[in-house]
Image (cartoon, rainbow, N blue to C red):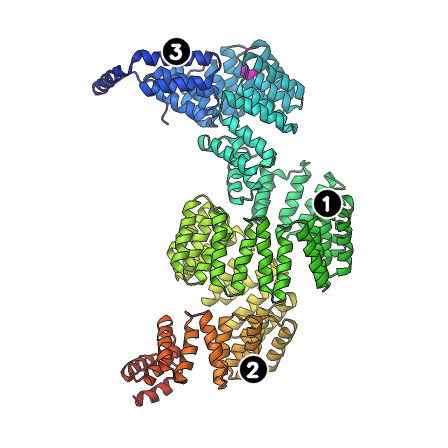
Amino acid sequence: MSTIKNKRTMSLAALTVAIVFGASLAGCGKGDVQKLVAEAKQYEQKGEHKAAIIQLKNALQKNPGDREARYLLGTIYLKTGDGPSAEKELSKAVSLGMDAAQVRPDFARALLMQGQYQKVLDETQAVDLKGNAVIASLRGSAYLALGKVEQARASLEAALQATPDHPEALIGLARLALSQKDIARANQLMEQATTKNPGHVEAWLFKGDLERAQNRIDASLAAYGEVLKIKPGDAGAHIARAYVAIGSGKLKEAQADIEAAKKSNPNGLLVFYTQALLDFSEKKHAVALESLQQVLRAAPEHMPSVLLAGAVQYALGSSEQAEQHLKKYLEQNPDNLYARKLLASTLLNSRQAPRAITTLAPALKDDAKDPQLFMLAGEAHMQAKDFGKATEYFEKANALAPNTARVHAALGMSKLGQGDNERAIAELEKATSLDVKAAQPGILLVMTHLRQKEYDKALIAVLRLEKEQPDNPLVQNIKGGVYMGRKELANARASFEKAVALQPSYFPAVQNLAQLDLQNKQPEAAKKRYLALLEHDKKNLQAMIALAGLGVVQGNNEETRTWLERAVSEHPDEAQPAGLLVTHYLRLGDKQKALTLAAKLQSAHPDNPKFLGILAEAQSAGGEPRAALESFGKLAALQPESAQLQYRIATINLMLKDEVAAASALKKSQQLDPAFLPAQLAMAGIDVQKGRFEDALAIARQVQKQHARLAAGHALEGDILMAQKKPAQAVGAYERGAAIEPSGLLSVKLHGALVQAGKNPAAEARLGHWLKDNPSDTRVRMYLANYKLVSRQNKAAIEQLQAVVKLEPQNALALNNLAWALGEEKDPRALQYAEQAFKLAPENPAVLDTLGWMLAEKGDAARGLTLLQKASGLAPGSADIRYHYAQALMKTGDKAKARKEIEQLLTNKGFAKADEARALLKQL
């Protein structure tokens, strides 16, 4: 809105328009308008604001240019707490010719009500404060809200010089004294304000607030009572009494006062805010959010609502929205410890430990006495895996709140992170003894024993916990986990069943039972469990996602799609099912459907970064890297401190062959989080490609130091040495990694290095040892099978592939390779496996090639040719597939086309079967 000015001049053309406009209103009935305005004034005198507003709106329908009606309507909106509407009407009154000086104080109050403090100062800067106590007081309040204490004091004292005992100036000075913790001075000023101005509502309201801040509840209620004597039904007094009732836990009384406030001010923003506060206190978070949205749509700078919106979104689990609100609040109120702790908790929930640490830092002063603050700092450092610092903060919390179960539980977890298992268990046992009825410390103790594989001790601990909480499904579920560790599957199942009996919709226990069913190869039994849960909780998202997962396991793509689509329909605001459905479409090769859904969901949730992330990932996987880059760029603007997003931007740039932009994004990622492993590995990869091996090795050493408990740094060093063709040295690096964190991937890398170093027996032995200990590792078996196939050891390859197919009957790649290996051995089962693979992956060119070539060799050249033609089209760069296609063409008698294919193949210098192809060409 532009600055209010007194428009005293008017052009001839404008004057003519005004005369014509005025004449056109003559027919509306000037007397009718005046009558409506007069009735509105009468209603207003009785305190009937709603009726007054209705009459004024009726008057303005008849004559929209009535400035007096506009002004009166604006002042009534002020009284009802509707700042945005007041601002709008007062501005219109001035534009219609109302004296700006008359309107300015009310206009400034409307701006103050909305938290537009700087705008108050801008609109009143030209006013001479001498003799103008009202404007001086308003400017003082604006300065105070902006934290400009000296300017606030000067303006408020100027108001008192103009009008001694001016109530608004005294209230402002009392606020200033309160901000400087001078309670006695604040009380003195408010006593002066109410004594000298016994009929001033705002003075009594603030006196009530001041008494409430000192926990003098009776005096506070008495002050609010004075307001209601002066002005019965006053919304402000009822709202204030509701605050007291909410703070005292008297929620029914609070609701009664809110209802009373609604009668006189049904659309008041403070009424909506207070209702939200009450709903939040009653854990009605979704309902509270609806009220807050009413406030923030009209007054986005109302800081109490911004803070409460942050708390509500946190309670609802909406971390991004909570973070946005809390950051906005802290920008204006950096000393608010509650908001700072809540923002840190939000960041911890979204696994942003470094930012949580930065957020808490300003509050962690030497004189800090808040144990919860130290607990949060400890949790942040523990999440960042800085267990020493975490322990330091937990011990500070313990010093302030000794013998607190939660503190000792946290100390136990930090000691566990430091590897001090004995002290960890001691702390957890102490936490359990301090609060035998609290589940968390006892569960942490059980989990610690499980981690140590101390199953007997874990059982003792969980049975003790069960004795205290026999009807807690969580305890029964964890007991089932203990029995699983002890290999007592019957007892485990019984515990999980008891958890479900206690709470039929308790998903973790249902899931554990379903997993047992799957281990017993009973997928239908697992399905029935999830369906039974949905009978008790028809919209349970986890159950729907689990049923979709079962569809994947069973190779039933239609069922997977059905459940994911239902999950999205039932939970349109949840990102998880949306992301899974988009991924499912992509997995089926329906890129357009995935992109359309992702775009639609993002459009429906423009303020939710998760849906923008889904769209970006869909664009990346759907072959639209430039669109993906744009979406990731928008996401990075919303989350500028995300190292993960800069890493994704780098990967897209690598897809686009823009290594300079990729390196720049990776550097940003590492600046945001120097220990972000994916960015480190990607940067090392670029260095290797460019031949900068020393730079890559420096990154590997940095990773080894920063992630000492991970094998990643040593694996990276091994990869760099392999790129330098130093397999013997790479073996040592891989072995160091395997000693820290053994894995199938490292076993494969070690096998490759040993083979290249000429140590084939050792390579075979190491991989065989891994598979002996991990017989279900199908990835390693697939690698070994491929190695055997390349080495022409078909029987050994068949052995591994049969093991994979037994474990994963729907593994199309394993079925295809098994078919090929059996075909090489002239085994009649080959065609059967090739058909199975084709049924599962009809668009895979390798699968099409295997089946097509087998059919061509066995005499079904027509069908074989069709499949090979499709395979050749899907993989035009595969010389082997095109050669098979040419041979099939020859078998079906199309020699001209076969010749053309072979001639094109022979232009490829890397074609391994060139000699064979030339010989075949001579026969054509």
Identify the mark at residue 46; answer none if there is no mark. none
Q: Secondary structure at mark 2?
A: helix
Residues 241 and 95: in front is 241
Mark 3 or mark 1: whose residue is earlier in sequence: 3
**Res 284 → quadrant:** top right
Percent x, y of residue 392? 69, 46
Identify whether 350 is placed above or below 6. below
Q: Is residue 792 left or right of residue 451?
A: left
Mark 3 touches mark 1? (CB < 8 Å)? no
Percent x, y of residue 241? 60, 22
Which segment did they paint magenta?
199-203
Percent x, y of residue 47? 49, 15
Name the image quarter holding the N terminus: top left
Identify whether 783 is placed above or below 305. below
* Residue linked to disc 1: 438
For label 1, count other residues whose C-alpha is less than 10 Å away and answer few (under 14), some (14-19) or many (20+). Answer: some
**Res 188 → quadrant:** top right
Mark 2 touches mark 1? (CB < 8 Å)? no
**Res 865 → quadrant:** bottom left
Q: Is residue 338 magenta?
A: no
Name the image quarter holding the C terminus: bottom left
* Residue linked to disc 2: 796
Q: Residue at x 75, y 60 (%)?
A: 455
Q: From the viewer's perspective, is the residue at label 3 or at label 1 nearer?
A: 3
- Let me know if residue 36 appears in the view: yes
Amino acid type assigned to the residue bearing label 2 in the image:
Ala
For label 2, count other residues whose C-alpha is less than 10 Å away and answer few (under 14), some (14-19) or many (20+). Answer: some
Identify whether 581 is placed above or below 269. below
* Residue linked to disc 3: 38
Amino acid type assigned to the residue bearing label 1 in the image:
Ala
